[in-house]
């Protein structure tokens, strides 16, 4: 049986992180949208509650295939992801390391190739695009896709990307403060009235965000990160909270795995939920998303694996105890994910890059 997973309330949050800049206010604000999959349902039979909270149905995302194959085959593989029952297909945002795809273009093509599948940036680097221009692209994509867009934003963590593009790689506090302003601009522009915004990093004057999105008041917003500042921002403003290790050039890969130990994982959840409550939001409206670091699923006598570079360097004990690791038979993996949702409220999952490992789990749990 999989190891027990401690409840999120067991971790203490520690002292509050200081604000890096006063939060400016946009003249147009947006309320929280109804993110997909908000109907309560248990993994077994019908609606229920987990750890005293409503149960959110499972959703799964899969990475887009690389642009190293014929484009017709690429589209076929996107359609296969849809046919397997995944909720969305997702893409990262880098310019180095052999990365070839532009996320906004790839998301548009994926939406055109499918009928149900949602498209998600996981996550877009805020420093790469001005929020006014990003809003225009995202609003168009939501309209053209018939309301199948999910917006993922992060502060950026890979210095090589910034250096290659000649962009300053500012200290984390500055990047997070800039991300917070960008979020306000984006959400304001998705609203019904023109936006005037005066911040430290962005200024917008009497701008009406067009076109208006299909999803109202705006497409679901995912903010992903590992630091307290990012997760508190997500709790205050996002619809989906992406729980990650703290990634930075100076973070050892083994430390990244430790960042998703049961205690740290619970703490990250608690930061987001507490920030939502302090902002006057109901923490139960948050959807929590996580990517599994190491997946080993035995299906019909064959073990299918998907292992991240961080997990390859971790010892067996660290992997065995991490909530972001999934090992065992299909039944055992299903039980572990149900336990993960029960303890932490996590229901939106990325099970790595091996569809053979993920597919039998998605078939059992998607929408339940």
Image (spheres, helix red, strand yellow):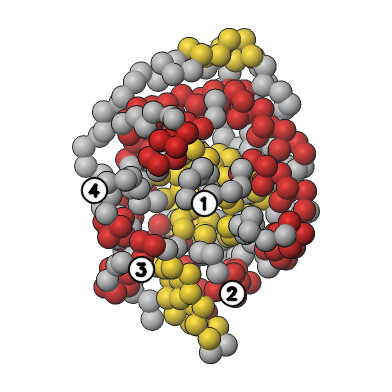
Q: Which residue is mark 3?
A: 312
Q: Quadrant of residue 177?
A: top left
Q: Nearer the viewer, residue 157 or 340?
A: 157
Disc 2 and disc 1 in contact, CB within 8 angstroms = no
In front: mark 4 or mark 2?
2
Instruction: Describe the element under mark 4 as helix, strand or loop.
Output: loop
Q: Earlier in the sequence, mark 4 or mark 3?
A: 4
Q: In the drawing, does residue 313 fall left or right of residue 57?
A: left
What's the distance in space between the residues labelled 1 and 3, CA to CA? 21 Å
Q: Which residue is mark 4?
A: 12
Q: Earlier in the sequence, mark 2 or mark 3?
A: 3
Q: Position of residue 291 (x, y in %)?
A: 46, 58
In front: mark 2 or mark 3?
3
Q: Earlier in the sequence, mark 2 or mark 1?
A: 1
Query: Label 3: how many residues lie within 10 Å, few (<14), some (14-19) or many (20+)?
Result: some
Q: Which residue is mark 2?
A: 356
């Amino acid at each position: 049986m999989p190891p027990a997973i401690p409840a999120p309330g067991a971790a203490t949050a520690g002292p509050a992180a200081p604000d890096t800049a006063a939060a400016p206010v946009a003249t147009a604000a947006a309320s929280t949208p109804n993110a997909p999959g908000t109907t309560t349902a248990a993994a077994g039979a019908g609606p229920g509650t987990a750890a005293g909270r409503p149960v959110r149905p499972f959703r799964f995302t899969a990475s887009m295939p690389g642009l190293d194959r014929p484009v017709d085959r690429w589209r076929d593989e996107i359609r296969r992801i849809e046919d397997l029952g995944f909720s969305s297909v997702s893409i990262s945002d880098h310019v180095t390391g052999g990365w070839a795809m532009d996320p906004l273009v790839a998301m548009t093509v994926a939406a055109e190739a499918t009928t149900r599948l949602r498209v998600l940036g996981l996550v877009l680097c805020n420093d790469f695009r001005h929020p006014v221009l990003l809003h225009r692209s995202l609003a168009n994509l939501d309209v053209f896709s018939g309301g199948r867009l999910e917006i993922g934003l992060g502060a950026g963590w890979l210095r090589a990307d910034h250096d290659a593009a000649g962009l300053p790689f500012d200290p984390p506090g500055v990047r997070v403060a800039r991300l917070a302003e960008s979020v306000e601009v984006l959400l304001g522009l998705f609203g019904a009235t023109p936006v005037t915004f005066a911040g430290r990093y962005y200024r917008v004057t009497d701008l009406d965000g067009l076109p208006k999105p299909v999803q109202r008041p705006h497409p679901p917003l995912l903010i992903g990160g590992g630091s307290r500042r990012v997760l508190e921002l997500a709790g205050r403003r996002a619809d989906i909270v992406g729980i990650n290790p703290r990634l930075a050039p100076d973070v050892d890969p083994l430390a990244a795995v430790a960042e998703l130990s049961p205690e740290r994982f619970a703490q990250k959840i608690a930061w987001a939920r507490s920030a939502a409550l302090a902002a006057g939001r109901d923490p139960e409206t948050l959807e929590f998303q996580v990517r599994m670091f190491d997946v080993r699923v035995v299906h019909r006598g064959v073990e299918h694996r998907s292992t991240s570079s961080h997990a390859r360097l971790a010892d067996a004990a660290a992997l065995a105890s991490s909530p972001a690791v999934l090992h065992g038979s299909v039944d055992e993996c299903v039980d572990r994910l149900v336990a993960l949702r029960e303890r932490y409220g996590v229901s939106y999952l990325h099970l790595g890059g091996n569809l053979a490992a993920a597919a039998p789990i998605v078939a059992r749990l998607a929408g339940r």
